[in-house]
Image (tube, rainbow, N blue to C red):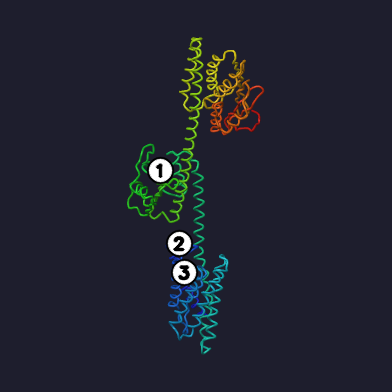
């Protein structure tokens, strides 16, 4: 009984040796990557096959001799390799190690049984590889190993002559060899745990990257040094780095962590030579054994180039540690993922800035189209009065000068509604000089203080006068109305002219200006650019009403069919 236990320990000892060798191999990055792959090339499968053939052959040489037989772990190597990697590993390992076992002791009692059971082990492992569930492979491996070792014992009993020798051999090596097959489960679990470890690390990295993305996203709305500094601090805190920096291709833009006092970010700090190499090569630079660094005694650094939309390098993300060899493969992958995330966020932010700039440029262009139109009509009105009423002409020139002076000074800022109404009154003063008693203007104003772009209201009044009042032979009336509603302000201009045609209403809605609707179309486009909702135009009996809504702070547009 004691001798059986010692022989079992010998099996475990040799299996442990194989397990240790596999464990150390799994710590080597290339081999670790090879084991973790799902789809392997022919060369990679050949490499793994050679490895397990070597394990199986080596097991024969390390076997313990008992009664002309060998206590070894050859079957363990064959079954484990076949179950984990399939027929291109299990079958060659079974055939090679079985033939080797036979050839080194052709006349031995157990040579032929070992050859046959080794080949069967490779075939059985292949069957399990294709048929068994992954979660139960370790159990099927143990059962297959025990079955193959049991087959070996049976063949020894059947093929060994004299029969008494076979019985003696089986009685001494049967129990240790069969029970020792438990080690197959340990080997399978070791490799499977390596894959599980990879998935767990990937999941943690994905969660960490998402956490960083969620925390940093608000700071990418404006691409500024202070925003980048906040981003650096978040990354440094989340990944446990000693320092994090963001640079462009020339200067350090932001820095957080140890050594921050050396960077007064309102100034300019040229990037280091190491960073310049990363910018120029476009490659990731990693150094886990920096001999010297001019800042805070850093010994591990990774510098990842930043690219916007996969174009040229626009900057770098730099991560520093004081300890040597602190940047692991997992951390490198995380840093690369963060850099790609940052590149995408920066590209989106820059696109938003370009879009906003284009919107402002379009808005200014629309304003510039209105100003000459108004000026042309105002100068015509004044010229008609110079001979008839010079004093009145001088007053109108003064009004026009005030209007233009204010217009030049406004820039693209928003103005108060009262200022816009002042502009309208100046315009009406000029037009009333032209039309005299034919033009009556009524202001129906609620006391409201709200901001709006300049020259939204005046073109509507101009349109009402030129296309509503001017064509009539008799007098007409223009009403300018401002109504305070709960969540918005309604501004309307009504006239008592002949009324706008449906065709013009549809042209304005489509943004297609014509000779009779230039002013309306410009205001329509500007309102849509700013508020997402344009003019509401309807024909009256008599006349036309044009209105629009301005949302109050925190308010929203309310749907209504009434203008």
Q: Residue 452 falls in which quadrant of the image?
A: top right
Residue 166 appears at what percent x and percent y?
A: 52, 86
Q: Secondary structure at mark 2?
A: helix
Q: Which residue is identified by label 1?
A: 255
For marks 3 and 1 on the same chain, the one whose residue lies earlier in the sequence: 3
Residue 360 appears at what percent x and percent y?
A: 48, 32
Q: Left of 525 or right of it: where is 267? A: left
Q: Please report contact status of discs 3 and 2: CB closer than 8 Å, yes or no.
A: no
Q: Nearer the viewer, mark 1 or mark 2?
A: 2
Q: Is residue 451 visible?
A: no
Q: Is residue 289 above or below residue 521?
A: below
Q: CA distance from mark 3 to mark 2?
A: 18 Å
Residue located 51% across and 84% down the image: 169
Q: Which residue is identified by label 2?
A: 33
Q: Please report contact status of discs 1 and 2: CB closer than 8 Å, yes or no.
A: no
Q: Secondary structure at mark 3?
A: helix
Residue located 65% across and 22% down the image: 542
State the residue lying farthest toward the right.
541
Q: Secondary structure at mark 1?
A: strand
For marks 3 and 2 on the same chain, the one whose residue lies earlier in the sequence: 3
Q: Which residue is identified by label 3?
A: 19
Residue 469 appears at what percent x and percent y?
A: 60, 19
């Amino acid at each position: 009984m004691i001798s059986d236990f010692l022989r079992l320990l010998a099996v475990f000892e040799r299996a442990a040796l194989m397990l240790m060798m596999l464990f150390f191999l799994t710590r080597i990055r290339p081999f670790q990557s090879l084991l973790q792959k799902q789809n392997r090339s022919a060369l990679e499968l050949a490499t793994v096959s050679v490895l397990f053939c070597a394990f199986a052959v080596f097991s024969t040489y390390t076997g313990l001799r008992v009664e002309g037989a060998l206590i070894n772990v050859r079957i363990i190597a064959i079954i484990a390799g076949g179950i984990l990697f399939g027929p291109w590993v299990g079958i060659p390992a079974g055939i090679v190690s079985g033939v080797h076992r036979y050839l080194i002791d052709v006349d031995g009692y157990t040579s032929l049984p070992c050859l046959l059971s080794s080949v069967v082990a490779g075939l059985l492992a292949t069957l399990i590889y294709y048929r068994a569930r992954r979660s139960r492979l370790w159990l099927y491996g143990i059962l297959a190993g025990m079955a193959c070792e049991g087959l070996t014992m049976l063949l020894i009993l059947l093929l060994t002559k004299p029969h008494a020798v076979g019985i003696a051999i089986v009685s001494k090596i049967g129990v240790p060899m069969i029970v020792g097959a438990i080690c197959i489960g340990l080997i399978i679990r070791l490799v499977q745990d390596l894959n599980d470890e990879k998935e767990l690390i990937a999941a943690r990295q994905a969660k960490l990257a998402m956490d960083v993305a969620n925390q940093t996203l608000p700071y990418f709305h404006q691409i500024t040094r202070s925003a980048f500094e906040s981003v650096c601090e978040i990354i440094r805190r989340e990944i446990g780095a000693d320092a994090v920096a963001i640079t462009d291709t020339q200067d350090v833009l932001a820095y957080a962590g140890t050594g921050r006092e050396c960077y007064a970010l309102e100034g300019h700090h040229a990037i280091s030579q190491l960073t310049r190499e990363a910018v120029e090569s476009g490659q990731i630079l990693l150094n886990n054994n920096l001999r010297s660094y001019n800042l805070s005694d850093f010994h591990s650094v990774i510098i990842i180039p930043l690219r916007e939309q996969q174009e040229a390098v626009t900057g770098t993300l730099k991560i520093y540690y004081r300890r040597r060899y602190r940047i692991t493969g997992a951390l490198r992958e995380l840093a690369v993922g963060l850099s790609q995330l940052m590149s995408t966020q920066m590209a989106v932010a820059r696109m938003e800035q370009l879009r906003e700039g284009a919107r402002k440029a379009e808005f200014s262009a629309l304003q510039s189209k209105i100003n000459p139109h108004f000026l042309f009509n105002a100068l015509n009105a004044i010229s008609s009065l110079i001979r008839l009423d010079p004093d009145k002409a001088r007053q109108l020139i003064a009004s026009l000068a005030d209007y233009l002076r204010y217009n030049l000074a406004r820039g693209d800022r928003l103005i108060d509604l009262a200022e816009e109404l002042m502009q309208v009154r100046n315009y009406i003063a000029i037009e009333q000089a032209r039309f005299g008693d034919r033009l009556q203007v009524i202001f129906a104003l609620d006391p409201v203080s709200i901001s709006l772009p300049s020259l939204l209201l005046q073109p509507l009044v101009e349109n009402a006068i030129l296309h509503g009042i001017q064509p009539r032979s008799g007098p007409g009336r223009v009403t300018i109305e401002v109504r305070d509603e709960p969540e918005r302000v309604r501004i309307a201009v009504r006239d008592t002219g002949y009324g706008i045609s449906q065709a013009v209403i549809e042209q304005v809605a489509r943004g297609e200006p014509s000779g009779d609707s230039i002013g309306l179309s410009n205001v329509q486009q500007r309102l849509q650019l700013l508020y997402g909702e344009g003019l509401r135009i309807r024909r009256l009996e008599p006349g036309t009403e044009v209105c629009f809504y301005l949302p109050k702070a925190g308010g929203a547009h309310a749907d209504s069919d009434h203008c």
